Image: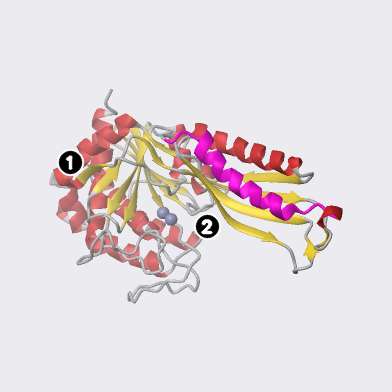
């Protein structure tokens, strides 16, 4: 290993020295993306990269999640750092040499970079084990993109014994300047639930609607009423989004269908509003249907909960990042992001913070760069050194000081 890994120089210098390895691992993961809870090839790459380090590895039964544990030279607090490993089911349309070689799969959310940054942080922190009082858990997680990987890892007990005292995760975004980290205290990201409503009437001849019970106008009324419900019943300062994204019914022009199916998404930024929306959708749909002698069957499929950052953890991360990378490297966000994250499950159990790190490609305007989940998403690999340094600085700062009061 290069000398800088064990010297007392900054975490960033150590991360810069490791850049060739960080980039190589990120590219190897990028060209062989895996989707969902089963990411064995990615996990094998992680294990190979960590081989020989003083880490204890813990794996679960439900998925390919792994926690690598570094015991410092002296006892102390326990901090968790997370990197997610899964890709998205979509084609890649970049011209990169290392673009996806797997048809229909792409690392369009930057989880390849998250995994590689966490591996490099583990290498650097292992090299400074003698100076560490406490313990660091490196959480390598599959199935972030809607598969509840973090929840499965919690259910498998991978975050028990030792349990973390604080947890931190970094997510890249091409829509911020390279190396700039941002977060906010409290709600950081929204919850994301799916809903489906089946309105059932009685089929019949389209010329004689009074002999049938037509669910079509009833479904339309429900869609309109859901919009009224959200604007009239939900606090504008604790907002929710209900979007009807799909309506299916009917087979031809002269038949009244028996059913109409409605599907959509629910986003909220507090668990209280999320619950109110679940109840409201049922109440509105069922009562409107009843008024017209139809029935409405409402199904809600819970997705990720609201991601809530702990205020002291955000304050601490800000201090650690500014000390390490300068004032300009940290920005407090004013508003949450309406996307969702399954690190929310971890933050329901333990205090911590989910943060974004800018990776806008060189020469591009970060406001216009292809975002996460774009088939053309690209990231600035130079900013991965910042991400590695951020992981290390946060771990060091938390183990030394804990969370501020
Ligand atoms: Zn994503
Ligand atoms: Zn992501």
Report x, y in % for residue 276: 56, 34
Q: Name the residue: 28% across, 60% down.
A: 22
Quarter of the image for the N terminus: give it: bottom left
User: Which SS type dominates the magenta stretch?
Assistant: helix
Q: Quadrant of the C terminus?
A: top left
Could you tell whether 158 is left or right of 213 in the image? left
First in sequence: mark 1 vs mark 2? 2
Q: What residue is shown with label 2?
A: 36
- Residue at 36% x, 32% y is 310
Few, some or many residues within 10 Å of mark 1 (<14, 14–19, 20+):
some
Residue 233: within the magenta?
A: yes
The image shows residue 228 at horizontal and vertical percentages of 55, 42
Dot 1 beta carbon under 8 Å from ligand 2: no
Which residue position is annotated with label 1?
Answer: 322
**Nearest to the observer: residue 388 or residue 321:** 321
From the viewer's side, name the closer residue of 119 and 385. 385
Circles 1 and 2: CB distance less than 8 Å?
no
Compared to residue 261, the image places residue 73 above or below, namely: above
Disc 1 secondary structure class: helix
Q: Is 265 on the left or on the right of 45, as rendered?
A: right
Give the magenta part as a residue range: 212-236
Residue located at (62% from left, 41% from top): 281
Quarter of the render that holds ligand 2: bottom left
Indicate yes or no: mark 2 CB to ligand 1 under 8 Å: no
Question: Could you say which is closer to the camera, residue 362 or residue 386?
Answer: 362
What x and y, as percent, mark residue 365? 23, 62
Q: Residue furthest top?
A: 405
């Amino acid at each position: 290993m290069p000398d800088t890994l064990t010297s007392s120089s900054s975490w960033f210098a150590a991360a810069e020295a490791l850049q060739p390895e960080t980039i190589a691992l990120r590219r190897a993961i990028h060209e062989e993306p895996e989707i969902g809870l089963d990411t064995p090839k990615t996990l094998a790459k992680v294990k190979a990269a960590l081989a020989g380090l003083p880490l204890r590895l813990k794996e679960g039964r439900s998925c390919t999640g792994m926690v690598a544990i570094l015991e410092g030279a002296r006892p102390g607090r326990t901090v968790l750092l997370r990197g997610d490993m899964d890709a998205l089911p979509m084609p890649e349309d970049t011209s990169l040499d290392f673009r996806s070689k797997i048809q229909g799969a792409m690392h369009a959310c930057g989880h390849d970079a998250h995994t590689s940054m966490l591996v490099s942080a583990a290498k650097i922190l292992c090299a400074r084990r003698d100076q560490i009082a406490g313990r660091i858990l490196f959480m390598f997680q599959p199935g972030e993109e809607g598969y509840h990987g973090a929840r499965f890892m919690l259910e498998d007990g991978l975050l028990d014994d030792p349990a973390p005292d604080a947890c931190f995760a970094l997510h890249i975004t091409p829509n911020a300047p390279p190396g700039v980290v941002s977060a906010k205290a409290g709600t950081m990201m929204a919850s994301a639930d799916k809903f489906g409503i089946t309105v059932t009437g009685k089929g019949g001849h389209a010329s004689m609607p009074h002999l049938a019970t037509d669910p079509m106008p009833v479904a339309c009324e429900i869609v309109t009423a859901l919009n009224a419900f959200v604007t009239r019943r939900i606090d504008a300062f604790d907002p929710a989004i209900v979007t009807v994204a799909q309506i299916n019914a009917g087979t031809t022009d002269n038949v009244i269908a028996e059913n109409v199916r409605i599907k959509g998404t629910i986003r909220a930024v507090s668990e209280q509003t999320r619950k109110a929306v679940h109840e409201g959708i049922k109440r509105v749909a069922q009562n409107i249907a009843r008024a017209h002698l139809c029935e409405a069957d409402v199904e809600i499929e819970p997705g990720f909960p609201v991601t809530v950052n702990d205020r002291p953890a955000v304050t601490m991360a800000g201090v650690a990042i500014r000390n390490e990378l300068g004032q300009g490297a940290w920005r407090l966000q004013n508003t949450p992001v309406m996307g969702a994250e399954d690190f929310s499950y971890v933050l329901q159990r333990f205090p911590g913070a989910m943060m974004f790190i800018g990776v806008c490609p060189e020469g591009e305007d970060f406001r216009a760069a292809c975002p996460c989940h774009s088939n053309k998403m690209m990231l600035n690999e130079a900013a991965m050194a910042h991400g590695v340094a951020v992981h290390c600085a946060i771990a060091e700062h938390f183990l030394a000081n804990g969370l501020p009061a």
